[in-house]
């Protein structure tokens, strides 16, 4: 018979045993969940609860293009696109001719363009060349291939290289400043020299067309692949950091010298300043200004409207000088170009004063020759209506904002269409009138180049008034024209 003292002890044992069983169950359950990959109890999903895998995240929806009707389609004909559109660049890229024997240390490749009748324009790339300071010539280890068995239509080097006015062009540069000798050994080059002979340094139209042609040449070399390296002739990523302009002429710097550095970041140098320690370099002989397609058809009315080459050049120039495009103003900004030498406008002061009677305008009279080129660009970029007598100063119209207007006063008997055609390419309005020549002071057919011009006061006022009112309801303006 059990004593009364032993009964509580048995009850404790039972309680301890029950607690141990419960703890063991919890322990087993916990590690079972760990084996299944759960951090119990926080991320355990009961069987009745759907996991995230049941509804995976949706895939990124595809980008669907706009209907093809929205894509820009050139409106110009092939003739225009081959002169003022990017087809000019791709056509030249696709017409390369290499002229050195395969075993030569260097090679010369010229890219050809034919947009002016039977004339063939050219730009060339050669590398690498050493410089002979005693002769002022770049020497290339190149033996010319025998082209006697090739089609006669393939242009020859150097015989078919073109030469233009003012002794410019690849033909003249090669004859005067490049020497070929197949015995010259190879010389590695870490820079590129662009050989340029300018027509002059002061005329804005001639200078801008020369620099424009050079920029197109470099664009072609960035999209043309060198067969020997399977890479573009010029690296688009280099930014011109190892490229220099070498001027072969004796003109002064002129106001546009810095614009030549748009693609060549090294200092501009004259060939007379190169010494015997000049390192080897690859050579670029660019399209000459005389080959620029803006010279073609400048006496004919053209219906070309897509000026992609021109717009790209002007955009680059404005970015080069950090010239901003101002916000449109309510008042129409009129800029009159004052000429101080040839083709002056007689009674100019009276004419200018009369313009102040046109409503809703501000008037500025400028002599561009007294301004730096960046300052000229700044003035033109703020201009809505540019007024002037025919001359190179009107070349600034290239930098007018789209929707602006130019007024050209031409001498009598003179029917030049160049600025009219450029205006159409640049989406700029164009107004023209003719003025009488001053009493004959030069007995020649070129009187228009020198003599002052006379225009009736009402005629001058009316042509500018028409131009101003043509943009009364453009940009941020809303004025009655009458």
Image: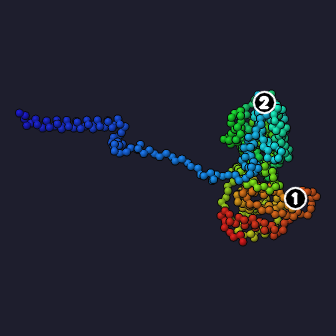
Front label number (1 vs 2): 2
Question: Who comes first in sequence, dot 1 or dot 2?
Answer: 2
Q: Residue 173 versus residue 405: which sits nearer the camera?
A: 405
Question: Residue at image x 73%, y 45%?
Answer: 89
Question: Residue at image x 82%, y 62%?
Answer: 409
Question: Residue at image x 77%, y 35%?
Answer: 98
Q: Position of residue 123 (x, y in %)?
A: 78, 41
For mark 1, what is the residue? 448
In the rendered image of this protein, does residue 114 appear above or below residue 470? above
Q: Position of residue 406 (x, y in %)?
A: 76, 60
Few, some or many residues within 10 Å of mark 1 (<14, 14–19, 20+): many
Q: Residue 6 versus residue 482: which sits nearer the camera?
A: 482
> Does residue 173 appear anywhere in the picture?
no
In the rendered image of this protein, does residue 217 appear above or below residue 391? above
Q: Residue 361 versus residue 171: which sits nearer the camera?
A: 171
Q: Are marks 1 and 2 in contact (CB under 8 Å)?
A: no
For mark 2, what is the residue? 101
Q: Which part of the image, by quadrant, shows the N terminus? A: top left
Residue 337 falls left or right of residue 58: right
């Amino acid at each position: 018979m059990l004593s009364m003292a032993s009964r509580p002890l048995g009850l404790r044992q039972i309680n301890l045993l029950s607690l141990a069983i419960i703890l063991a169950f919890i322990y087993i359950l916990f590690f079972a969940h760990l084996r299944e990959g759960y951090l119990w109890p926080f991320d355990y999903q009961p069987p009745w609860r759907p996991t995230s895998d049941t509804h995976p995240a949706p895939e990124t929806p595809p980008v669907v293009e706009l209907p093809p009707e929205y894509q820009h389609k050139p409106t110009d004909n092939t003739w225009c696109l081959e002169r003022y559109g990017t087809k000019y660049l791709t056509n030249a890229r696709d017409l390369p001719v290499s002229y050195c024997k395969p075993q030569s240390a260097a090679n010369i490749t010229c890219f050809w363009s034919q947009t002016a009748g039977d004339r063939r324009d050219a730009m060339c790339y050669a590398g690498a060349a050493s410089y002979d300071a005693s002769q002022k010539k770049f020497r290339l280890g190149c033996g010319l291939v025998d082209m006697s068995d090739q089609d006669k239509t393939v242009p020859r080097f150097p015989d078919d290289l073109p030469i233009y006015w003012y002794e410019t062009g690849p033909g003249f540069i090669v004859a005067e400043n490049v020497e070929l000798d197949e015995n010259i050994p190879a010389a590695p080059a870490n820079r590129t020299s662009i050989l340029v002979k300018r027509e002059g340094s002061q005329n804005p139209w001639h200078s801008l067309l020369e620099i424009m042609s050079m920029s197109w040449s470099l664009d072609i070399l960035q999209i043309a692949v060198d067969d020997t390296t399977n890479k573009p002739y010029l690296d688009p990523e280099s930014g011109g950091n190892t490229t220099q302009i070498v001027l072969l002429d004796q003109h002064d710097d002129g106001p546009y010298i810095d614009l030549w550095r748009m693609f060549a970041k090294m200092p501009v140098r004259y060939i007379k300043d190169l010494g015997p320690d000049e390192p080897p370099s690859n050579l670029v002989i660019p399209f000459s200004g005389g080959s620029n397609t803006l010279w073609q058809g400048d006496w004919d009315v053209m219906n070309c409207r897509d000026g992609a080459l021109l717009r790209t050049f002007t955009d680059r120039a404005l970015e080069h000088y950090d010239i901003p495009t101002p916000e449109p103003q309510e008042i129409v900004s009129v800029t009159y170009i004052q000429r101080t030498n040839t083709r002056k406008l007689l009674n100019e002061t009276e004419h200018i004063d009369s313009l102040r009677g046109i409503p809703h305008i501000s008037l500025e009279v400028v002599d561009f020759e007294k301004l730096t080129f960046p300052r000229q660009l700044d003035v033109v970029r703020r201009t809505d209506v540019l007024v002037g007598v025919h001359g190179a100063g009107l070349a600034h119209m290239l930098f007018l904002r789209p929707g602006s207007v130019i007024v050209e006063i031409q001498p009598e008997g003179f029917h030049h269409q160049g600025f009219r055609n450029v205006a159409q390419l640049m989406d700029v309005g164009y107004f023209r009138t003719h003025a009488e020549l001053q009493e004959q002071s030069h007995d020649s057919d070129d009187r228009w180049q020198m003599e002052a011009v006379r225009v009736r006061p009402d005629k001058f006022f009316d042509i500018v008034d028409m131009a101003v009112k043509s943009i009364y309801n453009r940009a941020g303006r809303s004025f009655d024209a009458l």
